[in-house]
Amino acid sequence: MKLIRTRSENPPPTPQPTGSRHVWKLLVVDDDADIRELTRMNLKGFRFADRDLEIIEAASAHEARAIVANHRDIAVALIDVVMETDDAGLRLVEFIRKEVGNNMVRLIIRTGQPGMAPERHVIEHYDIDDYKDKTELTAIRLFTTVRSALKAYRDLRTIDLDRVGLQYVLQSAPDIYRISNRSLNNFFQGVLTQIIGLCHLSESSFISTIDGAIATFDERDVKVQAISDELAHQPRFEEIRSHCAEAVLTGATPDGLRKEAYVVPLMVQQKPVGFIYIEPTADLNESDRGLITMVAQQCSSALENLRLHINLTESYDHMIDMLAKIAEFKDSTTGSHIRRIDHYTRLVAIELGISEEEAAFYGKASRLHDVGKVGIDDAILRKPGRLFPDEMDAMRLHTHLGARILEHDKFLAVAYDIALHHHEWWAGKGYPEGISSREFHLATRIVSVVDVFDALVSRRPYKDPWEPQDAADEIERGSGTQFDPAVVTAFLNLYRAGRFDDIVHATRSEGGLPTTIMAGPVSLRNKA
């Protein structure tokens, strides 16, 4: 994957960021106020790597301890040895390294009494980075010493940020793939969040704020999938989107973008399918860009998997709909019944504490509960009266027939369970096997209840519809014998709250279920 670096279009100068994220912090610890003042004067106007120097002063080791504890991003500390005690500075070094656990700050011992803390002894026994006699720290030497220490600190931080960043990328990978199984919107927003989080890993980062967007190509259109709030309200974003798309599709270096901006192509099967646009307030270093590119590569891989997943999901949804439609055409009196069972099942599942996503899956699976009726003789299915015992035996075969239709696909495992067992009883007196429904999937036990209720309140060739309250009373009487008591309780709670009123009303009208409450398609997966 190629990272496209932008050319400057000579935009208006970007204001220099301010605040601790964009300065080097130097701690000067010395009980001599003149030494502190001289240090400040000698380092006036000091800059390194386009960052100013912020000098923080402490008149004692005790005072410095509080400062160190509150400023974990101090880059360099100049520490006197003899202050409130003969070894106060050395004890401060131990505090910083061992108690605070700060191994990044560069520690420079600066003493006016070398005999009190011999150089060799201090270097061997204390984790310091330099030892200076105050008399040798002229303005030039001080400048050189601080600059060298800052360079060492920067390089150590870069290595550490690479490590932390790589760890972050690896940790974020499962999240990216997890959200890719939900929806495109969640997926892209999650990736953008990961990238912005990646660029704020450390207070020593050069980045103060970052805006960004992710877009994909839909034929000739560029569709923005996720965007940061600040960038979304920028009038220039339409122009940005156009420049980025042209750059990614042609491979040319984009003009018209701010010089700090970067465009990362999203590639699937070596073809550009979109881009990630990053706009920080200051230029990203090579490490930042490398980590962002790694996230973009994960995004591309996850996007390819997501599209395959969506295609597979849509194929299974179409298969479910086709099988349900076959059953509906076979028995026109129960066509709307199938859709109502879907809606009842979703509502009851949610009442039982199932997530909306899972409840939608239950509803989709429930639509195949009577798919086995495609194998039942029309004369029996459409008989305008009660069935004789031999006809009832033939009708009951629809559970086995449905199971045989669905048994060869693991993604239809719950639909299989429902089709085979939705006429089993809680007490074990149902059919086809006469075993307790405790053993079956929750979706099956829900369908057992709502299937009976809907059949009771519906008009059939052999009976008039029951009054809804009579049907609800019948469901309640079956609790603990025919039906799972927990499912009955959830069902009755919804019924008494009026949550089924629209469905029951639609049952008595042609069409069976108003489009305003019809359930939409969901994925059917293996939930057995």
Image (cartoon, helix red, strand yellow):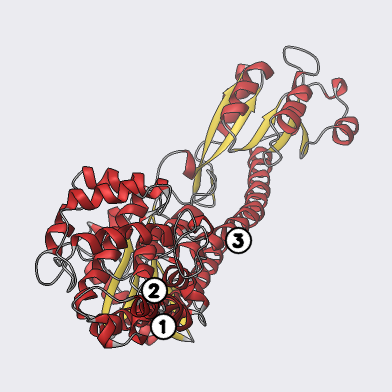
Task: Tell me the mark number nearer the camera, choosing from 3 and 2.
Answer: 3
Identified at 19% across, 48% down, the residue is: 469
Mark 3: give few (<14), some (14-19) or many (20+) Cα within 10 Å: some
Looking at the image, the residue that sits furthest to the top is 84
Query: In this orientation, does residue 55 appear?
Result: yes
What x and y, as percent, mark residue 21?
A: 48, 43
What x and y, as percent, mark residue 516?
A: 15, 63
Which circle's residue, 3 or 2, is located before the other in the chain? 3
Q: CA distance from mark 1 to mark 2?
A: 8 Å
Q: Which mark is residue 526?
A: none
Q: CA distance from mark 3 to mark 2?
A: 21 Å
Tell me the element at label 1.
strand
What x and y, as percent, mark residue 78?
A: 68, 31
Looking at the image, the residue that sits furthest to the left is 509
Q: Which mark is residue 272?
A: 1
Q: Amino acid at mark 3?
A: Leu
Q: Is residue 275 left or right of residue 50?
A: left
Instruction: Tell me whether the residue at label 1 lies in contact with that at label 2, contact meaning CB atoms closer than 8 angstroms.
Output: yes
Q: Quadrant of residue 70?
A: top right
Q: CA distance from mark 1 to mark 3?
A: 24 Å
Instruction: Tell me whether the residue at label 3 lies in contact with that at label 2, contact meaning CB atoms closer than 8 angstroms.
Output: no
- The residue at which mark 3 appears reads as 170
